[in-house]
Amino acid sequence: MQSPKYNSTQEMMMTNQLIYAQSDYLELSEHAAQRMCQRGLHEWQIELVLKYGREIHSRRAVFHVVGRKEIQKYGSKVPELKKLDGIQVVTGGDNLAILTVYRNHDLRGIRPNKRRH
């Protein structure tokens, strides 16, 4: 499942891409497309993160994260997952659009909102 190659960030953003994830299509924002190009990430990698990564709901967004726990659990079934350690895909709270994509091994920065009573 290889994604098409793009020569520039503008070329990728002009395609107005949709990424398939768990029977849903997510719209790729211009910012996310730009970050994917800058960080050398492909659509198939984002699809794997969305499928196998854990979901953390925080600050009205959903963080899809692949860490060592996911690699231990699914690594033998999906060997490509080992290269995705630390990839985080941020989607809107409604899970309709990918807002940004980055790599960070430290998950402490993603903290759920504290509930106030």
Image: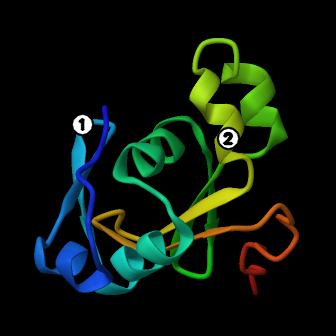
* Residue 102 vertical position relative to residue 55 in the rendered view, above or below: below
| Between 113 and 14, the one nearer to me in the picture | 14
| Residue 92 seen | no
Tell me residue 19's x, y (percent).
Answer: 26, 53
Q: What element carries label 1?
A: loop
Tell me residue 34's x, y (percent).
Answer: 39, 81
Q: Residue furthest front?
A: 7
The quarter of the rendered structure image containing the C terminus is bottom right
Amino acid type at circle 2 is Lys
Tell me where residue 98 sits by quadrant: bottom left
Tell me residue 97's x, y (percent).
Answer: 31, 70
Q: Residues within 10 Å of mark 2 (few under 14, many from 20)?
A: few
* Residue 42 vertical position relative to residue 71 in the rendered view, above or below: below
Amino acid type at circle 1 is Ser
Q: How far apart are marks 2 and 1 (CA)?
A: 24 Å
On the image, numbered disc 2 is attached to which residue? 83
* Residue 86 vertical position relative to residue 75 in the rendered view, above or below: below
Tell me residue 96's x, y (percent).
Answer: 28, 65
On the image, numbered disc 1 is attached to which residue? 23
Q: Residues within 10 Å of mark 1 (few under 14, many from 20)?
A: few
| Between 91 and 36, the one nearer to me in the picture | 36
Residue at the image point whose x is 76% and y is 86% from the top? 116
Q: Comparing marks 2 and 1, which lies closer to the viewer? A: 2
Tell me where residue 29 sits by quadrant: bottom left
**Upstream in sequence: badge 2 or badge 1:** 1
Q: Residue furthest left?
A: 15
Q: In this view, does 43 lie to the left or right of 86?
A: left
Q: Is residue 40 left or right of residue 85?
A: left
